[in-house]
Amino acid sequence: MDIQFRIDEREQGSFFIDQQGRQVAELDFEIKGKILNAYHTGVRPELEGQGVAGRLFDEMVKYARENEYKVIPSCSYILAKFRRRPDDFADLWYHSEDEPTGEACGIRPK
């Protein structure tokens, strides 16, 4: 399962995995200036529990660091990963007064 990458002229993009012509996992984001807003992570049920979302997350972190982006963790999954190990992501985590709740992708954190 190779992770692919795409970004359009509006600077909206995703890290994703296709299987047999069907997208089965994605981490979607948009970029404004030097800020990457990671707003959705999704994995199809047949791939849940196999570390796929973690691999997408790792690719996003690598990309953000390589391009010196700060990351807004609008997605509940991304926010949970940042909160579990804040020191590991201090260089990336964009903090603001209206801190994201992680509800952008429609899944409330546990």
Image (spheres, rainbow, N blue to C red):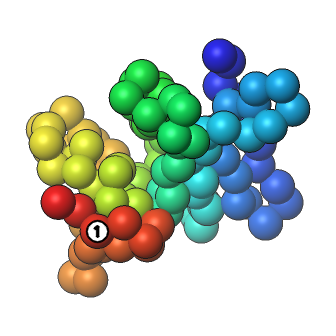
Depth order, front residue of 14/21: 21
* Above or below: residue 68 compared with residue 73: above
Q: In which quarter of the image is residue 33?
A: bottom right
Q: In which quarter of the image is residue 16?
A: top right
- On the image, the x and y values in percent for residue 30 come to 61, 62
Residue visible at 37% across and 29% down? Answer: 49
Depth order, front residue of 10/22: 22
The residue labelled by disc 1 is 108
Residue visible at 80% across and 37% down? Answer: 22
- Examine the rendering and report whether any part of residue 60 can be seen: no
* Above or below: residue 5 compared with residue 106: above
- On the image, the x and y values in percent for residue 66 come to 52, 31
- On the image, the x and y values in percent for residue 70 come to 41, 53
Q: In which quarter of the image is the N terminus?
A: top right
Residue visible at 40% across and 24% down? Answer: 51
Number of dots carrying numbers: 1
Q: Residue furthest front?
A: 46
- Examine the rendering and report whether any part of residue 57 can be seen: yes
Q: What residue type is labelled 1?
A: Arg
Residue visible at 53% across and 49% down? Answer: 42
Disc 1 secondary structure class: loop
92 left or right of 69 in image: left
